[in-house]
């Protein structure tokens, strides 16, 4: 009997595949804009978009899953179930009930599990084989129900998100976490793995670099402390060691000048706001905008007028498991929001603040370039000069400071035009900051401050008892470098990276603060012109390389950020809600009429007020505590 059933199912599947092939043929020949979902419905087939890159289709009584990208179709054996949420009882506890509707189709119901999707804590798991399970929770948030059932010796899994939003809490934005989903290619399909890094091609391609234990064998490179650095395209090690974002191991590569870069893959995100104990979710910043736990859009009084905190125009969204995520603008094609003229799969960010190197023909080495040193603020207000001055991203050197924003922009743009090099945009800073704060980075742990007074790139905090900043700091009087454990590859130094290990991005907190390619287009102050910005964007509007903000007032902090800031740039979404601080107690100022440029990250002198969410308005001049960073596009 089973063989006959399998034969019937195979025939139905073949018939469905023929209809999908018909769609592909017609779509190519007629340049039709009709979607596969629309085509199948027009042919009498029940279809549901799962909003995860797949369609669920019911054809001749059989359920199928169709991949919208590859058109791969297979029988859908996932359990079908519903999740019901009760009203709170007198103790503010809620019951979540999971009921399997097609339990009779399975030989066994293996398990029904409930997990708090906001903090990945398992609420409970029932393995009694029953088709209904109940769980009790006492906090708002998203809960993932997961059902596993076996049929014909094969186990299938089904998942569904239920939202508990009926426990009374007060909305606030003082604490939060970042929830990230990877996006496939340049589209909106949610995927389990990040996009592979773009190494470019030819003789100027980037070279993968990774760090491995010296006990692994068959590796060579330059020893650091307890690891070996490997720059190689050897597939044997590249596949195994190069990157694993789930293990906080971001992809690194070096450019032809020896500069280090880190790959930031395309993602969508949402902000989850919590109460002070990180127990109850109190709201979100997601595809709906800023909303309370019930999904109602928050209103803020700005300049005496009540404004709804809806999502910025031009920002794209994607839905997974019924949850709306924001496609981060740094990867999208909305120039006004910090994007490009096209959608991209990711970008490369300089691993360290930029430093300057000078060419010296008298050096008795193959490489004639040498670090500029501490003179003239590590670089000064100079431009790149062919065969004389260059900017690099390397550890254990003095960052390039004392430079106007116009030269930060020009030096970044001219760094490597073949790879779309440019001064890091505010949107890109925000993307790195959000990935850092997510489970793929520090997972909410604050990045330690680079507190080296000599602005040494990749350095860590002091040696006292503080978690991120200390009153003492050791610097070698001869070399000018921090102690070994405070350097980029030391046990303390690595805590200043975005991952807490050697694979991350450094100098995001402390060191020097960094100019970003963002400006106040509403400013008429001479700071905007005297520092050269009008030559770069004469009509004061956004370009793919610089983002225009708008603030015609002298106000530099407070709730006006909700009008001045942009989605994804790690300003208004992470604002505490009052005063002049963002999450983790760092400064939260922004561009104004007389300070038309953004500086990010803070410098070593800001102490614990520095951080990845730090933002401040600046006049754009050459300061001995301000630097910059290069990003490579696509």
Image (cartoon, rainbow, N blue to C red):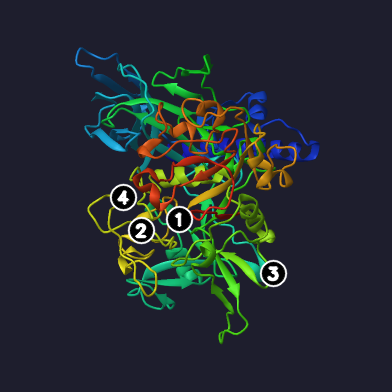
Residue holding disc 2: 460
Residue that protrudes farthest toward the bottom in the picture:
364
Which circle's residue, 3 or 2, is located before the other in the chain?
A: 3
Residue 140 lies left or right of residue 458; in this view the side is left
User: Image point 27% across, 36% down: which residue?
Assistant: 122
Q: Nearer the viewer, mark 4 or mark 1?
A: 4
Residue sitting nearer the eye, 388 or 376 = 376
Q: CA distance from mark 3 to mark 1?
A: 28 Å
Q: Which residue is mark 1?
A: 505
Q: Mark 3: few, some, or many residues within 10 Å (few <14, many ≥20)?
A: few
State how far apart marks 4 and 2 are (Cα): 9 Å
Q: Residue 350 at x, y = what percent?
A: 53, 58
The reply, left or right, for residue 552 in relation to residue 92 is right
* Residue 241 marker: none
Which dot, 2 or 1, sits closer to the camera?
A: 2
Look at the picture and state if 560 lies above or below 374.
above
Identify the residue under disc 4: 468
Q: Secondary structure at mark 2?
A: loop
Look at the numbered discs 4 and 2 and tell me whether their residues touch, using CB distance below 8 Å: no
Residue under pointer 3:
386
Q: Earlier in the sequence, mark 4 or mark 1?
A: 4
Helix, strand or loop under label 4:
loop
């Amino acid at each position: 009997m089973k063989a006959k059933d399998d034969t019937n199912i195979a025939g139905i599947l073949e018939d469905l595949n023929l209809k999908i092939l018909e769609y592909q043929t017609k779509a190519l020949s007629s340049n039709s804009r009709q979607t596969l979902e629309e085509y199948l419905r027009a042919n009498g087939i029940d279809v549901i978009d799962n909003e995860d890159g797949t369609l669920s289709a019911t054809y001749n009584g059989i359920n199928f899953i169709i991949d919208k990208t590859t058109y791969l179709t297979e029988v859908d054996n996932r359990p079908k179930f519903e999740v019901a949420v009760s009203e709170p009882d007198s103790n503010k506890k809620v019951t979540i009930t999971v009921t399997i509707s097609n339990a009779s189709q399975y030989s066994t119901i293996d398990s029904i599990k409930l997990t708090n999707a906001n903090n990945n804590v398992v609420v409970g798991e029932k393995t009694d084989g029953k088709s209904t399970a109940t769980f009790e929770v006492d906090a708002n948030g998203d809960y993932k129900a997961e059902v596993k059932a076996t049929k014909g010796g094969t186990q299938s899994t089904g998942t569904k998100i239920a939202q508990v939003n009926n426990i009374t809490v007060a909305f606030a934005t003082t604490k939060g976490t970042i929830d990230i989903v990877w996006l496939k290619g340049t589209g909106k399909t949610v995927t389990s793995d990040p996009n592979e890094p773009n190494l470019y091609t030819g003789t100027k391609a980037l070279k993968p670099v990774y760090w491995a234990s010296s006990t692994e064998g068959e590796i060579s490179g330059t020893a650091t402390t307890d690891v070996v650095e490997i720059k190689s395209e050897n597939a044997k090690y590249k596949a195994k060691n190069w990157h694993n974002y789930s293990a906080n191991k971001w992809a690194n590569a070096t450019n032809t000048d020896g500069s280090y870069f880190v790959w930031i893959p395309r993602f969508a995100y949402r902000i989850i706001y919590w109460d002070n104990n990180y127990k109850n979710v109190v709201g979100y910043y997601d595809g709906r905008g800023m909303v309370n736990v019930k999904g109602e859009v928050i209103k803020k009084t700005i300049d005496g007028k009540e404004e709804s905190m809806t999502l910025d125009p031009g920002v794209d969204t994607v839905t997974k498991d019924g949850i709306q995520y924001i496609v981060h603008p740094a990867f999208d094609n909305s120039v006004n929001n910090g994007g490009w003229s096209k959608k991209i799969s990711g970008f490369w960010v300089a691993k360290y603040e930029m430093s300057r190197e000078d060419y010296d023909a008298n050096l008795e080495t193959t490489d004639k370039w040498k670090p500029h040193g501490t003179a003239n603020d590590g670089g000064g207000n100079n431009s790149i000069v062919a065969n004389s001055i260059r900017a690099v991203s390397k550890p254990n050197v003095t960052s390039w400071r004392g430079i106007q924003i116009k030269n930060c922009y020009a030096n970044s743009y001219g760094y490597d035009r073949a790879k779309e090099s440019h001064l890091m945009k505010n949107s890109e800073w925000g993307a790195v900051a959000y990935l850092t704060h997510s489970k793929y980075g520090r997972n909410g742990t604050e990045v330690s401050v680079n507190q080296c007074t000599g602005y040494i790139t990749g350095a860590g905090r002091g040696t006292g008892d503080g978690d991120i900043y200390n009153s003492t700091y050791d610097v070698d009087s001869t070399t000018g470098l921090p102690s070994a454990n405070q350097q980029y590859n030391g046990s303390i130094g690595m805590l200043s990276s975005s991952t807490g290990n050697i694979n991350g991005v450094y100098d995001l907190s402390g060191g020097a603060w960094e100019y970003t390619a963002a400006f106040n287009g509403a400013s008429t102050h001479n700071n905007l012109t005297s520092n050269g910005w009008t030559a770069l964007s004469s009509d004061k509007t956004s370009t793919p390389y610089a983002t225009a903000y708008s603030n015609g007032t002298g106000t530099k902090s407070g709730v006006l950020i909700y009008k001045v800031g942009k989605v994804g740039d790690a300003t208004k979404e992470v604002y505490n809600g009052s005063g002049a601080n963002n999450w983790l107690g760092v400064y939260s100022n922004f561009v104004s009429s007389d300070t038309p440029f953004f500086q990010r990250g803070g410098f070593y002198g800001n102490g614990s007020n520095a951080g990845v969410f730090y933002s401040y308005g600046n006049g754009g001049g050459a300061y001995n505590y301000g630097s910059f960073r290069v990003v490579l596009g696509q």
